[in-house]
Amino acid sequence: MQQREEKQLEAAVESLISRVADVKKALHSFIHTLENEYERLTWPSVLDNFALLSSQLNTINKLLKNEKTPSFRNQVIIPLLLSPDRDEDLVKLTEQRVPVFSHEIVPDYLRTKPDPEVEEQEKQLSVEAARIGPEVAQKQIQTLNKLCSNLLEKLNNPRDDRDSESAAIRQSKPSFNPADTNALVGAVAFGKGLSKCRPPGPVAPGHPGQGPMMSGGPTLQQVTIGGGSGQQAGMGGPVAPQQQGQPGKIPSSIKTNIKSASGSMHPYNR
């Protein structure tokens, strides 16, 4: 009886190793395709690879759940020899992943429970789940199921339907105001709606008769002197218009009046 169980266990282990090797081979092939042939890779081929891996994992699950397969939970693995030296047979068996079988790596490779940190997180989640009442939990479950159903409906809908829906949304909700666009184009192209007043500040160079004559010095303004002999305009009077084509030139009448006024102000003529 014991020999029969041992033979069944060996056969189950060999079958399991063979199935795992098939999964490993499929993974290596898929990873190689992703890294080296990604330019020619298409989405249907990616789905085929995922389907292949899924079917192989389902086969392993069926093998483990088979009645003829002995329960691996009842089997105990005990390390008989621990050594810090390199073991070439172990390296070959594990494809150079485990070079030594020492006290440092045995707790990780032969662990039958999660890490203490993971166990602590699971306990916290269990405590939080116990605090939620049945009604609140049922509402959360219904909300999650509703979200999943909506997501599945969107994924199952054809792409044309999604494009038509997005186009309808764009048409119903414009992202700009035509009136503002037309006003902006008219202002930039034709100056429509812009104010005609000159902004305060220094005048741009190139305009004769305006602006300071010298930087930092006094300014010379044209004044209008009346035709009478005893009348003289102040420096703050209105600026006389300039003659066309002669920028900055003082008319002859103004020159005569200026000379007569300057002569009367001479100290020898007082």
Image (cartoon, grey):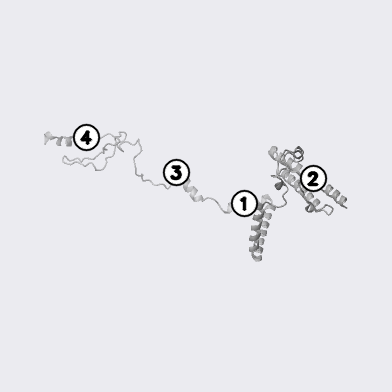
Looking at marks 1 and 4 on the same chain, the residue that comes earlier in the sequence is marked by 1
Of discs 1 and 2, which sits in the foreground?
2
Residue 61 relative to residue 154: left or right:
right
Mark 4 sits on what residue? 255
Of mark 2 and mark 3, the one earlier in the sequence is 2
Which badge, 3 or 4, is on the more N-terminal residue? 3
Which residue is rendered at x = 70% and y = 40% of the image? 34
Query: Residue 92's image quarter?
Result: top right
Could you tell me if the residues under marks 1 and 4 are in contact, i.e. CB atoms within 8 Å?
no
Amino acid bearing label 3: Phe
Q: Which of marks 2 and 4 is nearer the N terminus?
A: 2
Q: Is residue 166 left or right of residue 103?
A: left
Question: Nearest the camera: 270 or 152?
Answer: 152
What residue would you read off at disc 2? 17
Report the front residue among 81 and 258: 81
Q: What residue type is labelled 4?
A: Lys
Numbered disc 1: secondary structure: helix
- Mark 3: give few (<14), some (14-19) or many (20+) Cα within 10 Å: few
Q: Are marks 1 and 2 in contact (CB under 8 Å)?
A: no
Q: Nearer the viewer, mark 2 or mark 4?
A: 2
Dot 2 and dot 4 residues touching (CB under 8 Å): no
Q: Name the residue under label 3.
A: 190
Name the mark on residue 166: 1
Indicate which disc, 1 or 2, sits on the residue closer to the N terminus.
2
Q: Regarding mark 2 in the picture, which secondary structure is present there? A: helix
Q: Which amino acid does label 1 sit on?
A: Ser
Query: Which quarter of the rendering shows the C terminus?
Result: top left
User: Would you call the spot at circle 4 few (<14 residues within 10 Å), some (14-19), or many (20 or more)?
Assistant: few
Of circles 1 and 4, the one toward us is 1
The spot of residue 41 in percent (x, y) is: 70, 40
